[in-house]
Image (cartoon, helix red, strand yellow):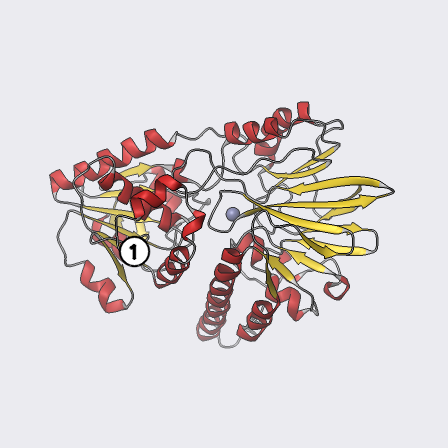
Amino acid sequence: MRITFHGATRQITGSAHLLEIDSYRLLLDCGLFDSERIDPSSLNRQLSFDPRALDAVIVSHAHNDHIGRLPFLVKGGYNGPIYTTPATADITSVMLRDSARIQREEVRNAHLRHPHIETPEPLFDLLDVEWVVERLDRVRYNDPREIVPGVTLTYLDAGHILGSAIVQLDYTENGRSRRFVFTGDLGRRNTSLLPDPALVRDIDILVAESTYGNRELDSYDRLMKQLHAIVARATRLQSKIVIPAFSLGRTQRMVFCLQELFAVHKVRPIPIYVDSPLANRLTEIHRDHPDAYTPHARSIMDRDPLYFGSKYVEFCQSWDDSRRLNHLSGPMVFISSSGMCEAGRIRHHLRHVVSDPSCAIVIVSFQAEGTLGRKISEGVERIQILDQWYDLNAAVYVLDGFSGHGDRNDLAWWFEQTGGNIEHAFLVHGEPESMESLSPLLQPHVKSPVVLPELHASYEV
Ligand SMILES: [Zn+2]
């Protein structure tokens, strides 16, 4: 087999890995680099292989850094199957349509701001997305499928977000049975909502993620205690809690954690408002897949008429709904996007709480350098929101253990469970310092040196 890394090399975006087995060419993931920006010179517009020569595309999960360039691939001539789990297929359709809409708006706004400068075309449009949706082929967990002659795909639950999968490929090469495994993004252990990542043994070739390879995150129990204290404070002060959260995964996780707090930890319930139309659509998809959650989570959600919904949770759709929230008095929780506070309705909610010391802002997601969310999490004195400056007086709590990614200990545990004897291993989807810190934990289970590939590097294994 030959493997070539066309993204997520020494960074966390742009997942795309090309496998050549015999005469077949298989692509694992086709994600966006730096998913918020679509500038013309970016790596997003450069495919370093011919999409028409691919035989199959295999998707690990529906985050944009894993699926965001699928329409560009189809626009470039790919017309074969795109394998996903059933939930990933549902989410992919919604995420890509939203991405096409955002790109169209970005282009229109750029043209309005600078009418004399030629505006770059969107990376793809809605029609390209519909072609992707046509090609989605659903494969369930633990249900092996021969996708090209001699190569069998098995998806295993990765516990990262709804539908997320570890990709296992079994094939024969030169008379030897071989097993290739791509972890996709691996979830945390013991997070209550989603199962722990599935374990895989007898691996010959491993490509593993390394996002939090140099970090240890708080345990779920500790996070719940912290969340408990924050809700109790809001109840005591009759104040508001604002949680910036990505629409996919983190929003649903936070709604569930609050439900669990009320149901199991007997915390006095306060109203929760989810204010993001995209999150609302994605939450409906989460309700369509009740088998995805742990028995514990289901026992909590079964008490309410809807999964991810109870009499305490209200999902807001229109702008009028959103504006109305600002006139309500606490205690209450707002969960809104974008997760890094760079766009969307979250900025309007932040404006109303940021200078009030009784209110709280809870950061539960990774915040990139330079974003508004990063500045808030660093506790700067003054911040600019929508062209106005505000004193940051609200209490700020950073609970990044709610991440969908396993930390260094979770990854090390997963590597140990492989049983060792891995012939070749590669680390992807992590910053260099994270990979370098994680590599020694993987090495004892691998016969050859663990590789941290560069962009477009290619290996015969
Ligand atoms: Zn992911």
Residue 252 at what x, y percent from top left? 36, 50
> Where does label 1 land, which residue?
306
The foreground one among 316 and 34 is 316
The foreground one among 268 and 6 is 268
> Left of 202 or right of it: where is 255?
left
| Residue farthest toward the right in the current orientation of the protein | 174
Q: Secondary structure at mark 1?
A: loop
Residue beneath the point at 62% across and 67% down = 135
Quadrant of residue 436 in the image?
top right
Crowdedness near tag 1: few (<14), some (14–19) or many (≥20) residues, C-alpha within 10 Å: few
| Residue farthest toward the top in the current orientation of the protein | 444
Q: Is residue 84 above or below residue 319?
A: above
Image quadrant where one finds the C terminus: top right
Residue 60 at what x, y percent from top left? 58, 50
Q: Is residue 117 above or below residue 363?
A: below
> Left of 387 or right of it: where is 406?
right
Q: Is residue 34 visible?
A: no
